[in-house]
Image (cartoon, grey):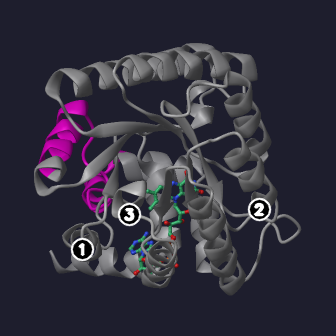
Amino acid sequence: MLRSSLLYLSERENLKRLLTKSSMGRRMAARFIAGENLEDAVRAVRQLNSEGFEVTLDFLGESVHAAAEAENACRVYLGILDRQETEGLRSHISIKPTQLGLALDEALAGRLLGTLAGRAALHHNFVRMDMEGSAHVEGTLRVFHQLNAPRDSLGVVIQSYLYRSEKDVEDLVKGGARVRLVKGAYQEPPDIAFPRKADVDANFVKLMEKLLASGGYHAIATHDPRMIAATQNFARARGLKADQFEFQMLYGIRRQLQRDLLRQGYRVRVYVPYGKEWYAYFMRRLAERPANLFFLIRNFVRR
Ligand code: FDA
């Protein structure tokens, strides 16, 4: 109930304006966001790299309303790729297809993604297309397949809460795609997504096994110790080495678990978001764990 309310609020412009303009809002978001500008993000990447983590950077933003905004987001991402190259940062980029105009004009989003994948390939880097709400899944996968970019420069995300994901995983691994597996962060109806968490988790394990058995390089993105243990057990049983897949987690979440995995010799990539458009991202993090809301409010009231 609280999860749905928070996800509903994540799309409300009036609360967004209120929260993003207030210093309280910014302080609350700081737990999950590296900062509002690129310098903040670069500082976070350097720190994480020095601790042994890989990174993927997200310049926050989604659902642009005009082609010019999509072009601008693409320019920012090109700048990030160049900056990462000159500074020798170990960091990929993650991008929401609607930030590149997917909902406005699929051809535009495809062209901009192609530009980004091309620049990433030049720098031996990698672009991950994040997966958004179900209205964009078909379009995202279509753009990915049509681009047919080199597999080591462009990859996608699959959400285990969707019924369709098993078939999508099968198609993707046949084509050698690199997949990030997540549970899914949006509000979806029961006719397209498992309503029960136990089923989302069971499907996560099933898809993780399909991915790791495929021989490709995939990312298992979760903070759930049971999903992580299932992945470790499956990888061990299959004789996979720790560098044949990676774990991914979000900036500011389960930091000790991130360090523990690194210490055990696993590759861990931290998803680092930055930028002024943090509202929707922040609300999804609250929705994943509503206890965060009470924690943040309590800390704020105590100040
Ligand atoms: P689960 O929700 O069961 O949480 C397991 C445990 O992790 C919790 O008990 C808690 O301890 C901790 N935890 C999880 N979320 C937390 C939070 N917000 N705050 C504090 N603790 C928390 N989704 C999507 O739809 N499209 C995408 O492209 C991506 N991309 C992505 C990248 C990466 C690197 C990660 C880790 C996640 C995503 N997600 C995503 C989000 C994903 O779908 C999912 O909503 C979250 O990862 C939470 O699910 P868990 O697998 O962590 O399990």
Relative to 36, say whether 286 is above or below.
below
Is residue 41 shown in magenta?
yes
What is the secondary structure assignment of the residue under circle 2? helix
Q: Give the quadrant of residue 108.
A: top right
Can you tell which mark lies on residue 166? Answer: 2
Q: Which residues are magenta?
A: 21-47
Q: Name which of mark 3 and mark 2 comes first in the sequence.
A: 2
Which residue is disc 3 drawn over? 241
Residue sitting at the far front: 239
Residue lying at 69% horizontally and 74% vertically, measured from the top left: 203
Label 2 beta carbon less than 8 Å to ligand 1: no
Looking at the image, residue 225 sits to the left or right of residue 193; the answer is left
Is residue 183 shown in magenta?
no
Relative to 83, say whether 278 is above or below.
below
Residue lying at 69% horizontally and 64% vertically, measured from the top left: 187
The image shows residue 30 at horizontal and vertical percentages of 26, 56
Q: Amino acid at mark 2?
A: Glu
What is the secondary structure assignment of the residue under circle 3? loop
Which residue is disc 1 drawn over? 264
Foreground: disc 3 or disc 2: 3
Q: Amino acid at mark 3?
A: Lys
Q: Amino acid at mark 1?
A: Gln
The image shows residue 214 at horizontal and vertical percentages of 62, 56
What is the secondary structure assignment of the residue under circle 1? loop
Q: Is residue 275 visible?
A: no
